[in-house]
Structure formats: C-alpha cells, structure tokens
Image (tube, rainbow, N blue to C red):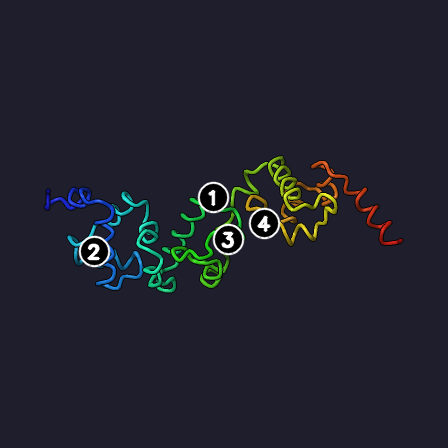
Amino acid sequence: MKNDDKRVFWKQENDLKLMQVILEFIEKHQINSVRKYQLKLKEYPKEVPSLWFIKERFGSWDKLLIQLGENRLERYCWSKIPNDELQEIVVAFIKEEKIRSQRAYERKTVGNKTIPSLDTLKKRFDDIKPFFKRETEGSVSNFELLFELRNEIIRLGLEESLSMNEFRNRANSEYLPSVDTIMRKTGKSWEELMEEIGFDYREIKIEKLIRNFQ
C-alpha cells in the first residue's frame, strides 16, 4: 500500500471503511458543511480522503451524507452555508431529479435533510423562479403541453366537468406549468384548449347552465 500517494491509499479501502473514517472525522471536528470539511482537510490532509475522491467514489458530498444516515445530518445547518454553495447544491439536485416546478421540488424534498426545503430557499433568495426556469416554456412544444394536459385531466377524472378552477387546485403534474402559462404559451383560452385536446367544453358548459336554471 503506497502511503505517499493518498489517492492510491484511499482507493484500496472499501466503502464501509471509508464511511467510518469520514464519519469519525466529521464528528471529531464537528463538521456541518462541505466547506468546513475542506478547511479541516487542509489541516489534516492524511486523515480523510479529498472531496474529489468522495465525488468519484460516492457521487457527491450529499450522497455520502445520505449513506451516513439521516440522524447524522441534523448538524447540516443550511444557515451556515453561503448562498453560492447552497445554490450549487440546489441546482445539482434539480438537474439530477429533473424537477420542473416549485411544487415538484417541495414534494421531492419532504423528509430529505440533505437538500434545503422550498421555505429555506424563499428565505435565502429574493427570487427563486430562476431555479425553476425549466426548459418548460422554452423547449417543450405545444403538442407536449397539450398531451400532458389531457393526461392530467383524465388522471383527475375531470372529463365530465372540465372545470378550470378545479384543475388549478388539484393538478400536480411536475411536467405542467400553471394554467395561465399554458394559455399564454399556446395563445388559447381554456375553452379552446379543451376543444384542442378533444373535449366538448361548450356542450358541458351548456348542460351546466341548463341544470342551474332548472
């Protein structure tokens, strides 16, 4: 084993051994962020592997923390992490999970202590919309939007009412932007959208009016 080359040294250890070494180092120096790990690593370069090695072996610092166990992650305090580093974590997570909306982000982060919550983002950044500027409005075609809109209406069982308000309140497809965004992007009203995807909205509206007058 070549002790003079730390990369070779750590490469020969199995994952369990590496996690034990890193966990002991984290607890010993009360490390609560990746930045503090880097600082302590400079002081004790031979005690633990580098971040480069951790990313190569475990995928990322956050994935390593997940494997160490959630009970260990309570020390991971977002308030102590600078904005630029927090932003990197969030952007990487959004890209990896293919998240396209704030609602989807909130759902994906419930109970996940390795990723800041939506509320945390709102407190730290004046505007969080740039995080979710997905390819939604730019690269997703009208056909894809309409296809997903139809699927979501059927999934919610709204074929008989086609209520826009009910759809607003109940829709949770992470592939769809808001109703207003869909109408703005397609240049169609809700009634026109319903006709476009194969529903007779006008007939349903007339039936509702007749029932209301009876």
* Quadrant of the image occupied by residue 10: top left
Q: Amino acid at mark 1?
A: Lys
Look at mark 3 in the image and give the residue it sits on.
107
Write down the quadrant of residue 124 in the picture: bottom left
Element assignment for label 1: loop
For marks 4 and 2 on the same chain, the one whose residue lies earlier in the sequence? 2
Question: Residue at position x 26%, y 49% from top?
Answer: 51
Could you tell me if the residues under marks 4 and 2 are in contact, i.e. CB atoms within 8 Å? no
Task: Name the image quarter holding residue 188.
Answer: top right
Q: Label for residue 98?
A: 1
Gap between marks 2 and 3 measured at Cα? 35 Å
Sequence order check, earlier mark of 1 and 4: 1
Local SS, label 4: loop
Q: Which residue is mark 2?
A: 41
Q: Calculate the distance from the C-alpha at mark 2 to the C-alpha at mark 1.
A: 33 Å
Type of amino acid at the residue the image marks with label 3: Arg
Secondary structure beneath disc 3?
helix
The label number, if any, that marks residue 172 in the structure image: 4
For the residue carrying disc 2, how many other residues have a C-alpha within 10 Å: few (<14), some (14-19), or many (20+)? some
77 or 13: nearer the viewer: 13
